[in-house]
Amino acid sequence: MPDIEKLHLEEALEDSPQTRSLLSVFEKDALILKKYTSNLHSCCQRVMSAQNELCAATQALAQQLRTYEVQKFPLESENSILTTTLNQFASYLDDISSVQQVLASQFSETMMYPLSKFLQADMDEISTMFEMFQIASHEHEQALTKYMKLPSKKDNEKARVEVNEELYAMRKKFHQTSLHYYSSLNAVQYKRRCFLLEPIMGYLHAQRSFFQMGQDAVCKPEIENFLTNIASSVQSVHQELSTETQKTVELIDTIEKQSAHLYNAEPPIDMPFIPPNTALTQKAGYLFQRIKQALITTKWDRVYFFTQGGNLMSQAKEEFAGSLVIDLNEEGVIAEPATADDRRFVFQVVSPGNKKAVILQAENYRERDEWIATINNIVKDSGYVRGKATPKKKEQQPVLTKTQSQDSASAPEKSSPVRANHSQSSTPAATPTDNFVIDTPIQFDLVSPSDENRQVTSPQTGPPKRINPFDQSSVDLLDSPVDNAAFSQSFTVRFLGSMEVKSDRGEQLVHGTMRQILAARAIHNVFKMTESRLLVTNECMRLIDPSNNTIRVEFALPDISFWSVHQDNPRLFGFITRNRSEGGGVTFACHVFESNNSAEEICQAISTATKIAFQAIMEKRSGKKPSVSKEVDKEKEKSDSE
C-alpha cells in the first residue's frame, strides 16, 4: 500500500498556524469522506430494501463507486489503488444489475454492517472529537490569558498558584484532546481503505452464493482472483492499522511524558532548572504583543512570531503567510528586557532608525531570555548587512554578482543586460529546511538578450554548463535545432524567481521554494514579473521574449529533473534543473513561474516531452526504427479526448 498522509502528533502541543492549516485539510477530508460514505450507505440500503428495483439500485451503487475519483479528496491521489479498485467493483456491479432477486438478510450482514459501523463508530467519533477539541482549545486560551494577566508583585501567592494550576490542567487537557483527535484523523486514512471495500466485497459474495441465475455474470475466474487479491489487500491494511495503532499509543505515552515540563508556563519550584540557550540564531513560538487601540488604550494579543532571513516575522492563526514586524538588518536594532502594564517576562525590540519599538511578553524568564539572545545574535552575527553578506561569507557570494560585472564590462551600455541590482533582485533566503542552501540569493528577474560572446553548448557534449542558467546567450541558443521537433507546445508564463537548492527532486522541496520566493517578494516589495513564451519540445525547453521573438534562456531536457504545480494555487508551478560547474560539480536550482491558465497543462506537456525523448533514446540504443511520431499521435489523441 502507498504511504498514508498523517498528522504529526509531536506538533500537537505547539499548535502552530502551520499545524492548524494541515489540520483543516484533514478535517475537510473527513467531512467529504463522511458525506461520501453516507451516500454509499444510502445506496446499499436501497439495494437491500428494494427487491423489486434491484437492477436500478445496483446501477446507482456502481455509479456512486465511480464518483469517488471525482470527489477531490485533499489526501487522496487521483490514480490511487482505492480508486482503481472501486472502479473495478463498479464494472462488476453493472453485470450483477441484471439479477432480479436478493436476500436481504445476507445483504444486512455482509454489506450494511461494515458501513454502519464505520459511520457510527468512526465518523461520529471524529465529529465528537472535533467539538471536544474546540472546547479544549477555547478553555486553554482563556486559562493562558488569565495567567498572563497576573501582576508582577507577589501580593497574592495563593491566587497565583491557583491560576498556574488551572493553566496546567487546561493545557494538559488540550494536549491530550489534540493527541487523540489527531490520531483519530490519522486512523481514518487507514480505515477508509477497509470499510469502503469490505461492503462491496460482501455484496459480491452474497450475489454469488444466493443467486444461481447470476452465475454466468459473477462466477468468473477473474472475479475470483480479484476478490482474493482485495481480501489480501484489506487484511494487509488491517495489519497496518493494528501496527500503527500500537505505535500511536506508545508514541502518545512518550510524548505526554516528554511534554510534562511544558504544561507549566512557569516552572514549579521542585522542577530542575533549565537555563536559557543564548546561542540560538533562529527561534519561533507564541508571544503576547502589546497593541495600541484608539491612541489611548492598549491590548495584548497572542501572536506566532518567528525569525527568517534576518527579519522578525509574525503570523496569526488564520493567516496563510507571515508578515514583517522588524527588519533586523537595520542599524541599531536591539532586544532588551522592558516593563509594561505591570506584566512579567516583558521585553522589547527597538529599531532607532525607524523609531519603532515592539513590546512582547513571553511565558517565563527562559523564553524571554532566549528570544532576546536570538534577536541580538541575528543582528550581530547573521551576516545580513543591507542586502549583502559580511566578509566572513565571501565564499558564498552568488555567481550572479560576478556575471554582472563581466557583462557590464564587455557589453556596451545601451545593450547591457536588463537586471535588478543585487540589493533588489538577490535576497538571501535563510531557512531551517535542510533542502535549501543557507544564504543563497534569490533571482527575481530574467536576463534580456545581449551581445555577449560566450559560447553555450549542449550538456551532452563539450564543456559543462554554467551554474546560472539565466546567463545563457540568446544568439547561441538560436542555433539549437528544435524546429523539426516531434512534440512542441507553447505557453505564456511570468517568471517569479529562482534559487539554488540541495536536491534534484521532491514535491515538498518545490512547494517550499515557492513559499520562500513569494515571501521574499512580499518582504522586499518586488512586484515586477518578466513575461515570456515557454516553448516545451522533446528536445529542450525555451523561454522566448514575446516582444522580439528572441530566446532568453534554454534548458536541455535531460537537465530538468522534477516539476510540480503549487498545492493551493493551480496557476503556479516550478521545476528543478541540474547545473554543471566548471570544476565538474553539479548544483541544483528551482525556478518558479506563474501561468495565465492552469499550470497542470504545462506540467503535463513537460511529462509528455520527457517521455517521448526517453523513448527516442531507448530506440536509438536498441537500433530500432524511431516511433516517436506514433507516440506524439497518441498524446494528441489523449489531449483531444480530454
Image (cartoon, helix red, strand yellow):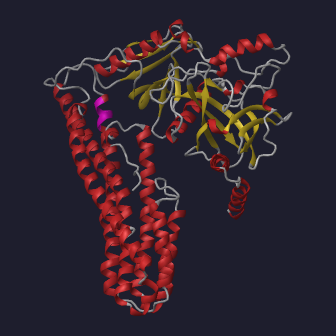
Q: Is residue 200 visible?
A: no
In depth, the one of 393 and 273 nearer the eye is 393
> Where the C terminus falls, by quadrant?
bottom right
Which quadrant of the view contains residue 104? bottom left
The image shows residue 434 at horizontal and vertical percentages of 45, 29
Name the magenta segment's main secondary structure.
Answer: helix
Please say whether residue 356 is one of the residues in the magenta stretch: no
Q: Is residue 493 visible?
A: yes
Where in the figure is residue 307, as x and y percent of width and height? 46, 23
The span picked out in magenta is 143-147
Q: Nearer the viewer, residue 536 or 524?
A: 536
Q: Is residue 299 left or right of residue 550?
A: left
Image position of 339 (left or right of 175): right
The residue at 49%/75% (across/down) is: 90
> 412 above or below 313?
above
Instruction: Pick the residue in front: 615 or 231.
Output: 615
**222, above or below 71, in the image:** below
